[in-house]
Amino acid sequence: MTAERVAVGPAPGPLKGKLRVPGDKSIAHRAIILNACGRGRAVVSALPQGLDVKSTVDVMSALGTLIEPLSPGTVSVTGRAMEFAQPAGALFCGNSGTTMRLVAGLLAGQPFQVQLDGDESLSRRPMRRVADPLARMGAHIETTDGRAPLRVGGKSLHGYEHHLEVASAQVKSALLLAGLGADGPTSVTEPVLSRDHTERMLAGMGVAVEREGLTVSLQGPAVPSCVDVELCGDPSSAAFIAVAAAMTPGSDVIVERICTNPTRTGFVDILRRMGADIDLLDQDDSGVEPLASLRVRGSDLSAVDIGAAEVPASIDELPVIAVAAALASGKTRISGAGELRVKESDRVATIAAMLSSLGAKVVEKPDGMEIEGSPELAGGVCIDAHGDHRVAMAAAVAALSCAEPVLIDGAGSVAVSYPGFFEQLEELSR
Ligand code: S3P
């Protein structure tokens, strides 16, 4: 387990080595939830050990799904064919927005009511974005002033043509899950394509999912057929290693077998535009999700402009892209990224504050930030991660380019998505 307070010093030299990062968290949630909805039994392997996925496993088990550990990181899931058992009490989703929103969609059409709770951070996050469209399908769903706890379920649903104002894979997935249990067609149109793992997996499970431009649709009621899923590495975790290597002169690092679904690899395009030396090796497009190994070598980085169209495919990586920008030559502008304010923390504020206290020049904007790069940051301070795993990891990557060591308070939060992060980072600089 990672200590609550961790010190990260300047990189003693280039980062070198080959590593694997934890399995993809987004796909893992879906592999558990969609197989639990399915008919049959499936084996899910290379499951990440982070707390978020554990929340999903616990919630789906409480709904009567048989999830049996077979070996470390491998479980079998016996599907309930869309008929879940009423849990004994409230379901606790921990820190995981994906768990809460997807499960809200899934339970909306079940014949019983359930309460969904979250930790302090999750209880601050907006839930009307899923409650309002679910209500349009006939769902009974109550929020607490627009946030968790939620109470959901007990009504039958009808299909609906949804048009989302914000590109959100969590909302889209919640509505598609509700659509599985609804009568008639359900479609979701987004302003920009968000990660499409749900629709890919459902199609692989025999559900007739159709995509036309930014609209995805399916016909309810439908029961997916369980399929085995072997998870590839999480690009959102790999991004922290990639930026660390790109920023540290002489580095040469390979992150093996990560998911290269284009709705997730916006950070690769952005880093390349900044001048990073990145190759995708051993590309394998044969499965439901494409994968490849990422090779990153150290190079000089320069500023970029990042706008709204690029945000959904890089949303979780923008915190560490901001670190790269703080060490790049020139002024980087990130705009159209207001969604960062409603993540595990207000990431516009927490990342801007973190970089400023390390000595970077950052101006916070309502929907992003401007960052004036410099060759080195000062460091020598204590950073508050605000309980946000990606803020803690971004601070650690920034610390590698600081003159003085940095203390990170709340470092234990990395357990949410990337247990072992600090150890792997240190290993690469040995
Ligand atoms: C996720 C979608 C994104 C992302 C989150 C995981 C998912 O959130 O930020 O970490 O697994 O669907 P939004 O859908 O709210 O943008």
Image (spheres, rainbow, N blue to C red):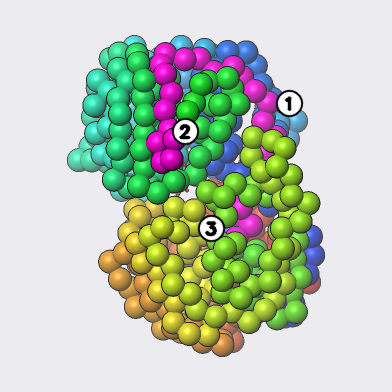
Image coordinates for residue 75, horizontal then vertical, percent: 67, 27
Q: Nearer the viewer, mark 1 or mark 3?
A: 3
Return the residue nearer the eye: 18 or 133.
133
Image coordinates for residue 347, horizontal then vertical, percent: 39, 62
Numbered circles on residues, count? 3
Asked if residue 275 is positioned above or below residue 100 in the image, the reply reads below
Tell me if residue 194 can be seen: yes
Distance, label 1 to label 2, CA atoms, is 35 Å
Q: Quadrant of residue 137?
A: top left
Q: Amino acid at mark 2?
A: Arg
**Mark on residue 26?**
none
Tell me if residue 352 can be seen: no
Element carrying mark 1: strand
**In the displayed structure, does residue 116 sit left or right of residue 142?**
right
Element carrying mark 2: strand
Q: Residues within 10 Å of mark 3 (few under 14, many from 20)?
A: many
Q: Amino acid at mark 1?
A: Leu
Q: Nearer the viewer, mark 1 or mark 2?
A: 2
Tell me the residue that label 2 is attached to.
211
Asked if residue 428 is positioned above or below residue 106 in the image, the reply reads below
Q: Earlier in the sequence, mark 1 or mark 3?
A: 1
Asked if residue 422 is positioned above or below residue 151 in the image, the reply reads below
Distance, label 1 to label 3, CA atoms, is 35 Å
Give the extent of the magenta segment: 212-239
Return the residue nearer the eye: 398 or 95.
398
The verdict on label 1 being within 8 Å of ligand 1 is no
Q: Residues within 10 Å of mark 1 (few under 14, many from 20)?
A: few
Q: Earlier in the sequence, mark 1 or mark 2?
A: 1
Tell me the residue that label 1 is attached to.
70
Q: Amino acid at mark 3?
A: Gly
Tell me the residue that label 3 is attached to.
266
Q: Is residue 154 magenta?
A: no
